[in-house]
Amino acid sequence: MSDISALVRDLVVANRILARENVVDAYGHVSVRHPDDPQRFLLATSVAPEMVEEDHIVAFNLDCTPVRHDGRPLYHERFIHGGIYEARPDVQAVVHAHAEDVLSFSISTTALRPVIHSGSFMGMRGHGFSAAARSLIEVVRMAVYIPRNARVQMNALRLGAEIRPLHDGEIAARDLGYKPYSLETRRAWRYWAHKAGCAHLVEEQAVDHVHKPWGSE
Amino acid sequence: MSDISALVRDLVVANRILARENVVDAYGHVSVRHPDDPQRFLLATSVAPEMVEEDHIVAFNLDCTPVRHDGRPLYHERFIHGGIYEARPDVQAVVHAHAEDVLSFSISTTALRPVIHSGSFMGMRGHGFSAAARSLIEVVRMAVYIPRNARVQMNALRLGAEIRPLHDGEIAARDLGYKPYSLETRRAWRYWAHKAGCAHLVEEQAVDHVHKPWGSE
Amino acid sequence: MSDISALVRDLVVANRILARENVVDAYGHVSVRHPDDPQRFLLATSVAPEMVEEDHIVAFNLDCTPVRHDGRPLYHERFIHGGIYEARPDVQAVVHAHAEDVLSFSISTTALRPVIHSGSFMGMRGHGFSAAARSLIEVVRMAVYIPRNARVQMNALRLGAEIRPLHDGEIAARDLGYKPYSLETRRAWRYWAHKAGCAHLVEEQAVDHVHKPWGSE
Amino acid sequence: MSDISALVRDLVVANRILARENVVDAYGHVSVRHPDDPQRFLLATSVAPEMVEEDHIVAFNLDCTPVRHDGRPLYHERFIHGGIYEARPDVQAVVHAHAEDVLSFSISTTALRPVIHSGSFMGMRGHGFSAAARSLIEVVRMAVYIPRNARVQMNALRLGAEIRPLHDGEIAARDLGYKPYSLETRRAWRYWAHKAGCAHLVEEQAVDHVHKPWGSE
């Protein structure tokens, strides 16, 4: 059995980080698949991510019904999360958000392309974007870097010359080399938690609790 | 009789939210029609919105004379508010503001167009913009999203390709589906109040007090 | 005799406002002509504006020697201030600053033009800009709005269509109608002081102390 | 012998300033050559710069092995620092960072050029940028101004007319006249430390401790 309370705490931290980094505001959410039951996932009730506390986290079945319904209002967009977990058994965590700098691409025919190393895993669709990843820490990192990638590309396009996005080989090499539990990723998690005012929820080894379906890094 | 003190408190919250979200600064204001007397509206005396307290809220007649004049200085631009309430009996709340990102459109021949769902109700004129809506919570939401819409459109235009604003059908569908007292709108109101440091003024059901001229949602 | 201590306090507030509004950082300064002796002006010793206290304010002769030299380091650029007071007897207050959004114009052949009402008094030169006005409150207001004007023009230019700056008639009309001690200007001063954390230095009538060489408004 | 504890404190301040000024985030670092042993340099262990304390600062040999290894995780990118100290005996301090506004240039064929006086010492390479200088205070100042230079150039390029970067003569004149321990540079250091919340670590003469290999200014 996994340490669910540590995972719930990490999910609270993830909510606060995404709010502090302007990825989500009143809208947008982050979820994580249940470590012991792949047919379930954890997500907050209908609360702005900046205000999420441990009590707000509840378990959902993949059809998006709450495992125990206590009458609290729920995010309508939880169906985006359930749908992704159902379709992609390899996905362990999901963010759905409307970060402003990504929206400009969504109404333009110019494609958002990976231009910085940290942005090389992203995928988009619809009016906002959804990011899916193999762990909570990884999906938070992607969601923080996607809008940053958008700004860097946007500004580079305005410099009035050619731009040089990452080519497929660079992205593949990066995908291969990326370690979601690396030293640098942990450092970022702790730093973002510190900025978001919830350093106290992050213990030295906190992110180790996050389930690692592929074993060691 | 309506609960005027709750509405006054909501109007204070509206002022603080608009300041915190950079829609207003020393200039700009928000008003609400009196729930029991459509010939009157509530607006602060001449104070920057961030500094508005319940004591600053006074009632005005539609000709913009204060119902009880106590000598405190008043906004000169209150005539914009009175004029709108007089001309449009369906309007329950008004914001007038000069948000920087909207001003660029006001000196350009490029029109500001609805490009994100949340921006689909806006209307502009003159050197700033005025937003009018069916409730206080709705006009605040519009006023927060109009500058955001401006930024998204501005950045999309700079991407150097075609942009795809919402078409009339999308706007109409949105207008039809929009519920000013929906779960999501309440969540946003509480979140913005929290960010603006006045969560204590927002009770769980606060926005229910706001008069609903069309009955239930 | 004027109330010098109130003017010194206003000059401290001016420093803090300009820092809070990102007009100055470690560099940049604001001065005011001595109300009783037009051959002198008041300016801080060499301290970043955000950190200026009443003790830092000293009097200078127009040749930029301090009236009483106590060995504290002085701004090298005080000569810009002295030079303006000497050349322009009508000027009562001066700001010199390097606000980032203005610098882009200073290296471009595109001229910064008044595009918003609040920006209609500005003048520029060299690597930063200097603003000179008839009162402290007026020069602060100009210095806050010049970078804002720069951003609005910059963004309008990028919208890819024609822009419509204020024409000479509008500027002249505005100049004529502008009242440095109007209700709105006072409201802005108090608001900016509040944001800058020095509301306690601004009494209800504080800016009335500022010398009015032209008598009543 | 130099006052190492004062230099360590200055390095902590440098970390905090760079974080506060958005030059570094979870990534990026600043180091200083050991004043008594040019074959060594001081750098934090693997911690986000905003969270660096005096305890985190350790000494490294030029081959980037820690002088005393206590098992704490280290920055992988410390090799950038060691490499620069080895190749350039005149360099006393190094910053490596990924500031967003610089990244747009790194994926564009438009070159980042010195456009403001403060930016005239910069050098770039790879996916981020490295700045090397003759003192800690100087490298921090450069690292703060390089992204600012990037923004000013970026915005000037968008004004749709010619830009006029500094020409070689201006840069050379500036290089000649620049004094890393000038009054203005000290003022900036104190101001940035104040903003970063570590004014208490900066005594009046703090930056005097920094080794001056060329003697007096």
Image (cartoon, coloured by chain):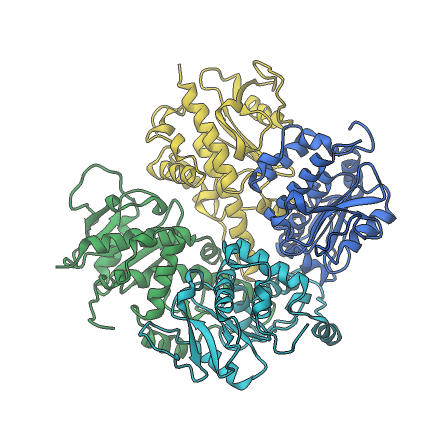
Chain colours: A cyan, B green, C yellow, D blue
In the rendered image, which quarter contains the N terminus of chain C? top left
In the rendered image, which quarter contains the C terminus of chain C? top left
Residue B84 picture location, percent across and down: 26, 58
Q: Is residue C110 visible?
A: no
Rendered view: A89 above or below A194? below
Query: Quarter-wise, where is residue B102 in the image?
Result: bottom left
Residue C52 picture location, percent across and down: 52, 30
Foreground residue, C67 or A208? A208
Query: Quarter-wise, where is residue D74 in the image?
Result: bottom right
Image side of residue C82 versus residue D73, left or right: left
Query: Quarter-wise, where is residue A50 in the image?
Result: bottom left
Q: Is residue B207 visible?
A: yes
Rendered view: B176 above or below D46? below
Task: Please report the residue visible at 50 percent of the width from the left and 77 percent of the height from the top.
Answer: A34
Residue B86 picture location, percent across and down: 21, 58
Foreground residue, A177 or A27? A177
Residue A193 picture location, percent across and down: 54, 57
Image side of residue D36 versus residue C129, left or right: right
Foreground residue, D40 or C110? D40
Task: Please report the residue visible at 73 percent of the width from the left and 55 percent of the height from the top.
Answer: D71
Foreground residue, C112 or A119? A119
Residue sitting farthest toward the front: A1
Number of numbered tags placed on the structure image:
0
